[in-house]
Image (tube, rainbow, N blue to C red):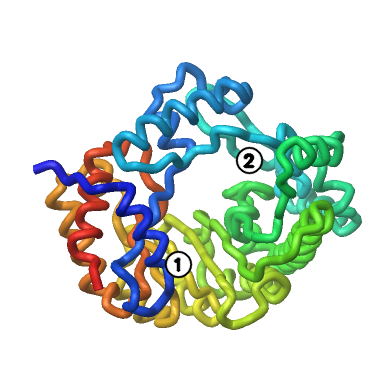
Amino acid sequence: MRYLLDYKQFWEENEKCFQPFTTKKPRVPVKLPFDDHFLLEDMQVESTLRYFQDREYRLEMNRLCNDKMEKAIGIRHFHEKEDMVLQPNRFEVIMGAHWEFSEGGTPWLESTVEDIEDVKKLIARAEKLDMYKEAFPEGWFEEKERVEKQTGIKLDYGERGHRGPCTMATSILGTENTCIFIMDEPDVMNAFYEVLSEKMVEYHKALLKATNSELKPGYWITDDNSYLFPPAAYEELCSQFLKRVFEEFAPAENDYRYQHSDSPMGHLMPILYDLGVNNTNFGPTIHPLEIRKAMPKAVIHGQMPPFVLRNGTPEEIIEIVKRDIDAVGGDGGLVETTAGSLAAGTPYENIQAYLWAVNEYGRY
């Protein structure tokens, strides 16, 4: 059996399905979180270094991948025209991390911290940073003006979000260091998170000011490494970060507050609920009923295991869709998507079966 749909109709209908906690919509909505890992595998690019460092090559690969995707499932996901050649400086790099590039992989952030004295120096340096000066590389404002004049479109940074406090710590301080320091150096780590929170707010405000953007209330975080933190440490250290950014950028109770973590971090769900997180995308080891029990007011984005979608049969994929919808779809608070990332190498045929199952079993 081929699980094909009228994809133009499917995606047009999908746009009408995202109202949370109501069944007055056609069906459960779908999100497909494609990323560069998927593209690199799908296109079998000759060089990942070239993809990330050669703009024209990257755009060509994006266009070719979009051609395949559109033919298979009716959408074009990847940017085909990057107007801004220069991007704002990465927050973690401003705070002391640096980019690493290697053939065969995607860029990642690496720490230079060796011991707790380095952390103290990092904190002292960060406290003095002027984020409006640090956020933009040389020539950025001229590039912004050129692009806006050329396209007639104003650059808008009104929507706010970033990687979360756990993952940023592992990038800036190092993963092993972070785990050791939260146990052995709680006072220093508290000071680190105080400055991290304030500088993150300053960074976002700098982007808003530089583009004269109006804040669109809401905030998202992606925090894969949150599983490393036990509840007490998370509540002591990371909660202050989330409280600060929510207070500034998502102050109302019903403002969008989203957390993604494709790790087994169910032990943190009660804390996240108390912080007002109202949209979740958690790892595949967490059953949707567990999330609904711990976070009854949160829209659940999930819980299709990425490797079931990549490696499973259509029947196995369909069973997971039915499980999720039967478990938590009835209250209108479900968005069907992968529990974490969409794994590289996922066949389009499996994605077709996934979309078919939602269309078949997710109707209200």
Question: How far is disc 1 from disc 2 in space, using C-alphas?
Answer: 25 Å
Secondary element type, mark 1: strand
Quarter of the picture holding the C terminus: bottom left
* Disc 1: CA contacts within 10 A as few (<14), some (14-19) or many (>=20): many
Q: Is residue 362 left or right of residue 316?
A: right
Whether residue 83 is visible here, answered yes or no, is yes
Residue designated by label 1: 280
Q: Is residue 181 left or right of residue 50?
A: right
Give the residue drawn at x 83%, y 40%: 145
- Answer above or below: position of 232 versus 335: below
* Residue 54 placement (x, y as % from top left): 62, 22
- Answer above or below: position of 8 versus 61: below
The amino acid type of the residue labelled 2 equals Leu
Give the residue drawn at x 69%, y 63%: 185
* Residue 269 placement (x, y as % from top left): 45, 74
Residue designated by label 2: 109
